[in-house]
Amino acid sequence: MKHEIFEHDIIIVGAGGAGLRAAIAAAEHAEHLSIALISKVYPMRSHTVSAEGGAAGVMRDNDSEDTHAKDTIFGSDFLADQDAVEILVREAPGELIQLEHWGCPWSRDPDGRISVRPFGGMTVNRTVFAADKTGFHMLHALFQTSLKYDAIVRYDECFVTSLLTDDGRVRGVTNLNLYTGKVQIVMAKSVIICTGGGGRAFPFTTNAAIKTGDGMALAYRAGVGLKDMEFVQYHPTGLPGTGILITEASRGEGGWLINKHGHRYLQDYGLGPATDTPTHRKMELGPRDILSRCHMQEHQKGNTFEGPYGHYLHLDLRHLGEELIDSKLPFVRELTRNYVGIDPVVDPIPVRPVVHYMMGGIHTDTDGKTSLEGLYAAGECACVSINGANRLGSNSLTELLVFGARAGRSAAEFALNQPSPLKSPIDLLAGDEQKRLDDNFLKKEGGTEKVAGLRQEMQIAMEDGVGIYRNEGDMRKTCDTLQSLRERFANIRIEDDTSIFNTERTVALELDFTLDVAETIANSALQRTESRGSHNRIDYPERDDENYLKHSLAFRAPGGPPKIEHFPVTITRWEPEERKY
Ligand SMILES: Cc1cc2nc3c(=O)[nH]c(=O)nc-3n(C[C@H](O)[C@H](O)[C@H](O)COP(=O)(O)OP(=O)(O)OC[C@H]3O[C@@H](n4cnc5c(N)ncnc54)[C@H](O)[C@@H]3O)c2cc1C
């Protein structure tokens, strides 16, 4: 079959915060490069839009790059690569100020300075914010800036199905144009994957429905390792039922977590004392992994409430007053009114832990480069790694700016030094992909398995085996379930055979990717026989630096579970110590 072929210098897959920042950086690096920006949704619908709390960066004299680095490394339970963290903290302030110049309306103090708010695990107020709609304003500023550059050519509502590789390097991508239903080829000298996370591998998540781990699976299938996939972050305060996030900023502004006896229970877990306002790294501003575990322990002790969607605790903002809530947390009031039918000015908010973020992802160096020549990655889909075993809130918006820009510049530099891509093998490669898509999705005949049913089984298996607390038996069961779901996936039934915006096909393609991501999470978790950060094993409750102060790297092994390798963590100036708050 003849395909429509488009040719550019650089392809960026994903137009969220990381993708847009990479596109702008590439356009600024070399004017004459042509940049394709491909997104399965309109850019402003990317998940970055829903970030609420803020972005961390050293802005004040009472703070320093070293303190930001130390907090991040400590929070990561010493699994972060310290060279990457040093780059993050050094380049963060410049990126945040640059974003203001591009139009991001940071909230300000009465004296005119950009405001900074406290955030979990950070010892100094360093999270800049635009009320509690930070992601919306950041994405807007990036999107409108990207419109200035003619070099950036957008492919909105195009779903990338594979990376085209040949001779040990990436040559482009195939994408399904969701509007026409046709498969297109986009060729380039370098490709940057910026496809975000994959929280949808779990049943209960703050993540948008589009967060299905596509880009991680694209790289994995092309032979690139996925790093530290066992580390999945639960956020302690999601709304029961929907999983909608109640931002950590609500605790940063002074909110309390209380159990059904009206007690601020965190003081019972070594996070006290319970002062009027939570202090840095204490009480409600403890790190997310620890707070999520405290919730589960309160549940075991019978101290949680029971509701139609299971157990929950209360997040109490009432003492903050209407004025503060309306000026600093207006979105929290909007969300709780619309989705729970309560007003946080007069009622406590029901909350429970919910899957929020993937620390792991495509293994890259500090310029976003992967092991496949010409392939780069940045943002949540990548693992550079600054988050290690537990991310501190507000570091990832900063990460996507700093490392999005770095990946954009290095992919541009790479493209500048390459000859034009050869067309000849491309048709052949794309022909194989067209056949795979036709047989399994586009012209799929027969089959009995429902995609929604398989997805639900996967999500339940993930929560059962690799949730907040883990043990060998349950993880093995999850690995086995995932293997059998992969086999059953070959027998899916797709009933809708239309070609324009066929969402049944799209969700099938997404589940195909998520199953890959899920198997790397479960199998990487199984091999790590220690507890570190978000990876908490009841059969191995201690951190084991002697054997596991190292990254895991999952490689695809067709027909079987992934092959897991390990390599050392980069330590520069902060020797591992016990992580106590
Ligand atoms: C509710 C919520 C609140 C958060 N709040 C904060 C916060 O306050 N501070 C903070 O630091 N972090 C926060 N985070 C985390 C942070 O927002 C995300 O990690 C970050 O925004 C991810 O950005 P990204 O550019 O990597 O991906 P995304 O913004 O998710 O963008 C992914 C892009 O990839 C595209 N894409 C995906 N698959 C395909 C495909 N197959 N083909 C084509 N295109 C594809 C999508 O269309 C989209 O454009 C929050 C996350 C959530 C879910």
Image (cartoon, helix red, strand yellow):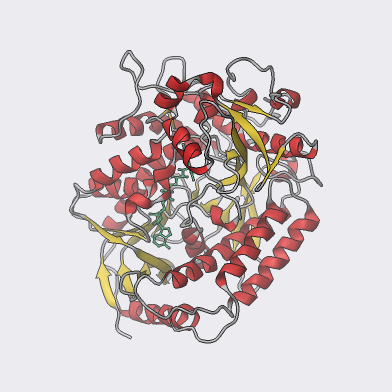
Q: Position of residue 259 (x, y in %)?
A: 70, 30
Q: Position of residue 19 (x, y in %)?
A: 36, 50
Instruction: Examine the image and state in which quarter residue 138 appears.
Output: top left
In this view of the protein, which residue sits in the foreground, 3 or 428? 3
In what quadrant of the picture does the N terminus appear? bottom left
From the viewer's perspective, is residue 321 above or below residue 455?
above
From the viewer's perspective, is residue 200 above or below residue 570?
below
Q: Is residue 235 left or right of residue 34?
A: right
Q: Position of residue 261 (x, y in %)?
A: 74, 27
Q: Is residue 109 left or right of residue 278?
A: left
Q: Is residue 425 left or right of residue 285?
A: left
Instruction: Examine the image and state in which quarter residue 175 appears.
Output: bottom left
In what quadrant of the picture does the C terminus appear? top right
In this view of the protein, which residue sits in the foreground, 553 or 5? 5
Residue at 29%, 69% (x, y): give it. Answer: 421
Q: Is residue 76 visible?
A: no
Q: Position of residue 296 (x, y in %)?
A: 72, 40
From the viewer's perspective, is residue 491 above or below residue 176?
below
In this view of the protein, which residue sits in the foreground, 552 or 235? 235
Q: Is residue 375 left or right of residue 226?
A: left
Residue at 39%, 82% (x, y): give it. Answer: 431
Count the marks: how many? 0
Q: Is residue 247 visible?
A: yes
Identity of the residue furthest to the top in this view: 111
From the viewer's perspective, is residue 337 above or below residue 216?
above
